Amino acid sequence: MTSAEDFAFVDCAGLDTAAAYRLVVGCVVPRPIAWITTVDAAGRVNAAPFSSYNYVATSPPMLAVNIAQRAGDGAIKDTARNIRDSGEFVVNVATEETMEAMHATGFEYPPEQSEALALDLALLPSRHVRVPRLAATPVQMECRLDKIVPLGRGVNTLYIGEVVAFHLAHRVYDGTRVDSVAMRPVARLGGPYYAALGEIIHRPMLQRPPGGEGWTGAEKP
Ligand SMILES: Cc1cc2nc3c(=O)[nH]c(=O)nc-3n(C[C@H](O)[C@H](O)[C@H](O)COP(=O)(O)O)c2cc1C
């Protein structure tokens, strides 16, 4: 039988930022990765990964990403500055195939250096925003900034964007549904660890989700 002694208890009163970070990134797993492209005032294309990220609305579709201050000097990250200045960003889905390049863009390049140029990332133009998308990823979402929400003691800020267009590679989209397995997304775990999709488990849906009509479970997930 499980008892209270089987658990460590960590009270968050007085918890410092580093300890809190270690706990949340270990507990909230696996996290999807938004590989975000932005453009600065000089037109340079910035790319960086963010796993404190999810969708937060469907009408219209909206994504949210938490961008922290730089750990060393507390400066604003290039992605955050560019989103504030331009009101635009693109979320590219990081995959097993693009993992090494995505990981490399997590390095703190100086603001005047474009990760897209430094790492020779192939770009494609977007339709509604000036920010280009990453050609090697199977899904890219063009976003317009909706809200900036400062969080807690000021280390973190939530950027909420409305998705104004999806770009979906034919190999992962049949015109109605996205084949998430074919996308081969990568996820972030705690510390220096990533994960690929594991076993796919099917259960009949218990409620009809919006757009889930006719979904039998025979389809690919
Ligand atoms: C997989 C991965 C996920 C990350 N997730 C976040 C995140 O959610 N929020 C954040 O502020 N930084 C995150 N980082 C760190 C940023 O990518 C890093 O600070 C980067 O240098 C920011 O680049 P920029 O200054 O060009 O925006 C993550 C790094 C990696 C490798």
Image (cartoon, rainbow, N blue to C red):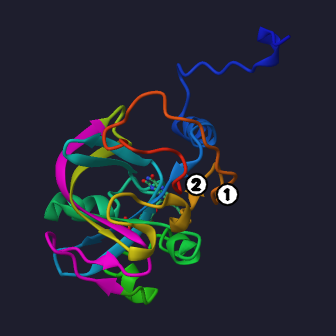
Q: Which mark is residue 193?
A: 1
Label 1 crowding class (10 Å Cα cut-off): few <14, some 14-19, many 20+?
few
Residue 197 visible, this orientation: yes
Residue 187, x across and y down, in percent: 57, 56
Q: Which residue is drawn at the image coordinates 64% and 44% (left, top)?
A: 201
Q: Is residue 172 above or below residue 177?
A: below
Residue 201 covered by magenta stretch: no
- Looking at the rendered structure, the kind of residue marked 2 is Arg
Q: Is residue 190 above or below residue 23?
A: below
Label 2 crowding class (10 Å Cα cut-off): few <14, some 14-19, many 20+?
many
Nearer to us in this view, 30 or 105: 30
For disc 2, the marked residue is: 188
Q: Which residue is drawn at the image coordinates 51% and 54% (left, top)?
A: 219
Q: Is residue 195 above or below residue 39?
A: above
Extent of the magenta region: 123-150
Nearer to us in this view, 176 or 165: 176
